[in-house]
Image (spheres, helix red, strand yellow):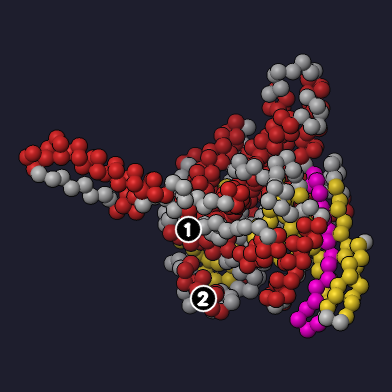
């Protein structure tokens, strides 16, 4: 218990700020975190997915230990030991601090920051403002971030933070005070810094909160393409799998995105940009589910028009470009017929209670942890392709990695090469024109070289946004190919989640082995 004195004008308030650092090297989730018979907390859910992949991977890791004289028994013990080290959350910071509201009242804020793994640093993870925030959720999301980064070859450990408030109930000055005080508390405990732990926006936070954090920490920030990164990454992830004939054959769909229908749960940052990119490339949005309303239109919902309507009205309810969904509860929209379902809201939305009724053939997990283990088993049994969160929504952390690199170098992407690339392109056209005129010019005079519209747009060189988008697309494609190869190697069929976990765990395992800090060899 730390005593913190707060001075405000003539008043002196003695307030206690509680901070607990819980360090774990082997502990797992205890039984009391289960929600009931047959139900698990979110963190336990992530652990179960991890255990399934680790069991499949263990024999391969033992077989890979060819340059050692250890017995098979010792090899197995060593592999199991490292897998046990990877699994738990390494550090958890639980904070309570006072904030003065605009009316003069003092309110105690509850917050958490979890660092799941430091096998790569810094740790990376969003900060969410929500009344649903709790320790179990923060640990689960931090663990997911570790595996997500490894899955797409981003060299970060996983982290997550949560503040237990409803941001809609606080004024902007109050939110600024909360965010800045949170930054101070994290800094005091060494839970923030460009080489230690890097925050990012999440549910209830955005660029505004990141600017407050950066200013408080005296850091830098910002990169073109970050806002839409998770939604754009989801599109690229879906596109990679829907164009793979073998997977489409397993779920009974034709390859290609054009003409496919989809339903989105959540029309925040991820849901909006996912809808935009999927629609732009030929898919049709036939339903949107939000916390206060659900709308449908079999002819398609215009994402731009819906975005403008929501910005103006604060809700999708009453949107003239669609009809209200009439069934109760409105969450039944998740079970309506479509090709692709995009749960992009909260965790644990697809459960054993509704999984068997889902008619979508592909589920793209835009949210973190929207599918429970029980539901996952049902979906696989029904030959539904689930593109898991640790891959499909990794666009955000991928572009955050690009942003981090930019901030370290203090140079925007393309700045050093922009003019050189433009001059090179013009020189290329002039060289082609000179060569053609030297060969044919005597009979036909000058030969003009006219670039195509697409090449003309690229002649000036790639902008920072172009480079970020290109890097994100390449990352998602490379990761998709690696996941598909793993699924084939272990004969996993449609179990893409386990394949993604296997890839992530194997990469983390190799870091621990090469570091040599645990077993000394």
190 relative to 398 in the view: left or right: right
Q: In the rendered image, which residue does mark 1 sit on? A: 277
Residue 17 in view here: yes
- Outermost residue, left side: 443
How many neighbours does mark 1 have within 10 angstroms: few (below 14), some (14-19), or many (20 or more)? some
Task: Say the numbered circle drawn on residue 195.
Answer: none
Q: In the rendered image, which quarter is residue 64 located in?
A: top right
Give coordinates of residue 366: x percent, y percent: 60, 56
- Outermost residue, bottom side: 103
Give coordinates of residue 214: x percent, y percent: 66, 61
The N terminus - image quarter: bottom right
Task: Please report the residue visible at 38 percent of the width from the left and 46 percent of the height from the top.
Answer: 421
Q: Is residue 486 above or below residue 95?
A: above
Give coordinates of residue 243: x percent, y percent: 46, 45
Task: Say the numbered circle drawn on residue 309.
Answer: 2
The C terminus - image quarter: top right
Question: Closest to the observer: 81 or 497?
Answer: 81
Q: In the rendered image, which quarter is residue 127 located in?
A: bottom right
Query: The magenta stretch spans which residues?
Result: 88-104
């Amino acid at each position: 218990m730390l005593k913190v004195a707060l001075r405000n004008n003539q008043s002196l308030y003695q307030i206690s700020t509680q901070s607990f650092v819980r360090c774990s090297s082997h502990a797992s989730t205890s039984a009391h975190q289960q929600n009931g018979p047959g139900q698990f907390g979110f963190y336990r859910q992530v652990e179960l997915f991890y255990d399934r992949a680790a069991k499949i991977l263990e024999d391969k890791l033992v077989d890979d230990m060819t340059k050692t004289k250890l017995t098979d028994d010792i090899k197995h013990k060593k592999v199991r030991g490292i897998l046990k080290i990877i699994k738990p959350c390494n550090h958890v910071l639980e904070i309570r601090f006072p904030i003065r509201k605009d009316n003069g009242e003092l309110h105690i804020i509850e917050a958490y920051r979890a660092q799941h793994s430091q096998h790569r640093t810094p740790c990376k993870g969003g900060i969410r403002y929500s009344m649903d925030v709790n320790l179990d959720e923060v640990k689960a999301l931090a663990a997911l971030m570790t595996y997500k980064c490894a899955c797409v070859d981003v060299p970060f450990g996983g982290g997550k933070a949560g503040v237990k408030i409803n941001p809609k109930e606080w004024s902007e000055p109050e939110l600024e005070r909360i965010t800045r005080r949170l930054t101070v508390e994290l800094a005091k405990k060494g839970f923030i810094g460009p080489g230690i732990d890097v925050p990012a926006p999440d549910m209830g936070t955005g660029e505004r909160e990141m600017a407050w954090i950066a200013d408080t920490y005296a850091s830098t920030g910002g990169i073109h393409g970050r806002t839409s990164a998770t939604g754009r990454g989801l599109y690229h992830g879906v596109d990679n799998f829907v164009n793979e004939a073998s997977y489409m054959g397993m779920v009974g769909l034709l390859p290609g995105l054009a003409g496919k229908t989809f339903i989105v749960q959540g029309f925040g940052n991820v849901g909006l940009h996912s809808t935009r990119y999927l629609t732009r490339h030929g898919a049709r949005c036939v339903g949107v589910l939000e916390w206060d309303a659900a709308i449908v239109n079999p002819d398609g919902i215009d994402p731009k028009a819906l975005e403008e309507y929501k910005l103006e009205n604060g809700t999708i309810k009453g949107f003239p470009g669609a009809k209200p969904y009439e069934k109760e509860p409105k969450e039944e929209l998740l079970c309506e017929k479509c090709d692709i379902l995009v749960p992009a809201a909260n965790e644990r939305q697809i459960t054993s209670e509704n999984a068997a009724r889902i008619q979508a053939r592909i589920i793209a997990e835009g949210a973190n942890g929207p599918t429970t283990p029980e539901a996952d088993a049902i979906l696989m049994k029904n030959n539904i392709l689930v593109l898991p969160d640790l891959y499909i929504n990794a666009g955000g952390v991928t572009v955050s990695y690009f942003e981090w690199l930019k901030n370290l170098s203090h140079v925007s992407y393309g700045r050093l090469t922009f003019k050189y690339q433009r001059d090179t392109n013009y020189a290329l056209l002039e060289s082609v024109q000179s060569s053609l005129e030297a060969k044919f010019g005597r009979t036909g005079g000058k030969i003009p070289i006219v670039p195509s519209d697409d090449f003309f747009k690229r002649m000036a060189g790639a902008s920072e946004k172009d480079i970020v988008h290109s890097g994100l697309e390449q990352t998602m494609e490379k990761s998709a190919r690696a996941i598909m190869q793993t699924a084939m190697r272990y004969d996993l069929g449609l179990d893409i989640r386990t394949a993604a976990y296997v890839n992530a765990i194997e990469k983390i395992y190799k870091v621990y082995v090469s570091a040599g800090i645990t077993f000394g060899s």
